[in-house]
Amino acid sequence: MLTDDPQTQKALSTATSTLTRVLHEVHWPTLSKGKPDAWLYFYEDFLEVYDNALRKKTGSYYTPPEVVQAMVRLTDEALRDPALFGRHEGLAAKDVTIADPATGTGTFLLGVLRKIAETVADDQGAGAVGPALGAAAHRLIGFELQFGPFAVAQLRLMAEMRALMGAAATGTGAGGNLPQPRLYVTDTLGDPFAAQTGFSTMLAPIGNSRKEANAIKRDEPITVVIGNPPYKEKAKGRGGWVEAGSPNRMSPMRHWDLPPEWGQGAHAKHLKNLYVFFWRWASWKVFAPDLFETTGQATDDRGGIVTYITVAGFLNGPGFEKMRMELRRDCSDIWVIDCTPEGHQPEVPTRIFQGVQHPVCIVVAARKKGKDRTTPARLHVRRLATGPRKNKFTELEAITLAGSGWSVGPSDWRAPFLAEAKAEWAGFPAIEALFEYDGSGAMPGRTWIIAPDVATLNARWAKLVKEKNAEVKEALFYPHEGGDKTLNKPAKAGLAGHEFRPSPVGVETGKPIEPIRYAFRSFDRQWIIPDNRLLNRPNPELWNSYSTKQVFFTALEKTSPKTGPAITVASLIPDHDHYRGSFSGRVFPLWRDAAATVPNVKAALLAHLSTTYGKPVAAPDVMAYVAALLAHPAFTAHFKEDLIRPGLRVPVTADAALFDRAVALGREVIWLHTYGERFADPASDRPAAPPRMPKGQGPTIPVGGTIPGAPNPLPDTMHHDPSTGRLHVGEGFIENVPIAVAEYQVSGRSVLRQWFSYRKADRTRPVIGDRRPPSALDKIQPDHWLPEYTEDLLNLLHVLGRLVALESAQASLLDEICAAPLLTEASLTGAGALASAPVVKGKKAKAAAQPGLFD
């Protein structure tokens, strides 16, 4: 593009002549080894080494050719379907225009070219391919923002056209005028109605490219949009016209905004993702481009297809309910292929995109001309088998839209794009439906303010406040990327129940605010400095409602538990990764206020259960009931197939006797999870003290087994010997540790190994998300094993031992409850039992409510 202008070409002549001489010596067949996609892999490897930050910043992850071939083939099949489009030539049909809005290195357009050539050769013969491709080139459109992949796409597409058409077909030999697809350097999400900005002579080709691309985006009908849009979280402000609109034109994204009355506003942030903006652009362009001009109604009824491979969060997330509703309105049929049955952060060899930890899916969304927007699209869903990516490529190769293996998805407007839940599971109310409020745990944003012992926190704070060098001190404090907590920012408020210091941390000279116990991970109680100036997102709701009577459930939100209990319980303020140590989830408190007078369990549900069982039912009873049913491995195993779809459900018994048994069992479960701090009852063998196994059955440290303290260094190893029942910690050991206790897991994460990882000598952890090195304060830790570590470990082993002993009773009770009459979600909803309490606003609410109740 930059050498098309004669003046520019003259100015760059030295550079271009040098490049030409070098490249002339390259023997391309040797370089590619006969593989037409060698250029793709070269560019991917180059970018990863040259500027991997650019790849992540732009969300660029290039699609494997095997996946592209499957997506192109499925799109071609949809076009041929007589019930949808009836184009027997598929992508080769002369009235089908295809666009890739994030062309990258051109892999999708290459796939389309090859499919057209294959179709023409099969129908008309090889001699007809050249002219057909020459005519088809104008129907292929590619938009790309980055010059690097754009240049590679140009090269690959021209080379492929020459190879498929043959030199004779061009009319002038290998160096002749070759018809080219229409490729443009442009921002797909940019305003197609904006006036063109002036460019210098040297950059005029870029200006012309954007001008021509805008004309296509604004005026030209497109039948198929296919591709792999970039993925980038927290992309607010990067959606261009699609996100922000323009004068006299509402932004297309506004049509996917969550209505306030749906009560899902907290999840709206998930729409601010680049791949969502590209979904919105494609649906606007293919299905109803004039939808937002004036009346809000479509003025152009056309058919078309959007085929994308993207992150799968929109299939189920609550923030995407309006998006799913509008796609159901727009489309006649939607096919969804879940490419990551392993869930979030799968093993690298199983990933379609090896650098992407999130689940991904392939979606073919088709709209038949004349589609009735009052009828939801037919949803067809399937999952690839778990296993290596090469096996997934093989499976994709065999999938057809008309073939077997598809399940019917729900037709409810806002329902997930997942298979219908089994009747039993679907009949249970969702766990969040039982509570007025659920939110995230505390999000500290810096790890140095959490430690397994108080002395470490005091030492870290002392080093921070004594540091004189401002730059070093800033690095020690570790300002969070995107956060607003800094050394020099004063605090407007403290955390409820703790000292408030309004001055900035940077002027501190004394001791820290007194550390408190903190529910850092499931069964791992560490310590935290409760200072609002240090916690990026403390979630005041949790602190305002905290008391010695508070109980918190924690569970996953976007993913499902794999093994172990489906929920865990805490009596302390929980971390946002409390449940598993990753995959931040939701927190369900027992009380909404610090006085423990306002239940978080819905009042309507308590009233309905009281009527059903013929006796009063209180919020603690419901918490205990849920703990009995969900906080054990049998629940996760029993509903393994149902838990493919994220989200927990609770079988609610209609039998008062079964409810009472579950409450009694659940009170013990909560007592164990909270180390004896909640639901204590000495008469029921639940003293207000750390739980203990029966004498002779619990873990003990014999003579000679003591875990050495000072002057010995901290241990770095811990292992369990099943033959002796010993848990070895460095040079010491603990006896009477059964295998089930040593291997106790929470969704695939070993509780003991995770607990020990925060107390051993080498506590370094993989860097995820924020790629900066951690604060040097994190390295401050004891140089020897502390007696309190031993005490904490023994308490943990006793708790796990008693929980393991309860599992068979919990499993049996779950089976009994599921086999007996249940109060289904439909029946509870019909009785008004799942209705939320009205939200009181204004001065009266603030005067009447406990602090934080309506925050």
Image (spheres, helix red, strand yellow):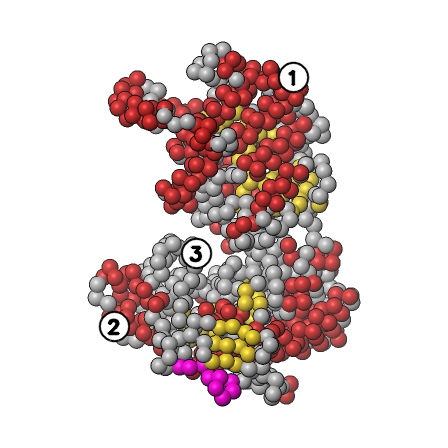
Earlier residue among tags 3 and 1:
1
445 is higher (above) or lower (below) than 36 = below
Q: Is residue 544 left or right of residue 336?
A: left
Mark 1, residue position: 124
Mark 3 is surrounded, within 10 Å at the Cα level, by few (under 14), some (14 to 19) or many (20 or more) other residues, namely few
State the CA–CA distance, disc 2 to disc 1.
Answer: 84 Å
Q: Which mark is residue 768?
A: 3
Residue 692 in percent (x, y) is at: 57, 84
Earlier residue among tags 3 and 2:
2
- The answer to whether residue 841 is magenta is no
Mark 2, residue position: 509
Residue 420 visible in this rendered orientation of the protein: yes
What amino acid type is highlighted by mark number 2?
Thr
Residue lying furthest right: 820
Residue 508 visible in this rendered orientation of the protein: no
Mark 2 is surrounded, within 10 Å at the Cα level, by few (under 14), some (14 to 19) or many (20 or more) other residues, namely few
- The residue tagged with tag 2: helix, strand or loop? loop
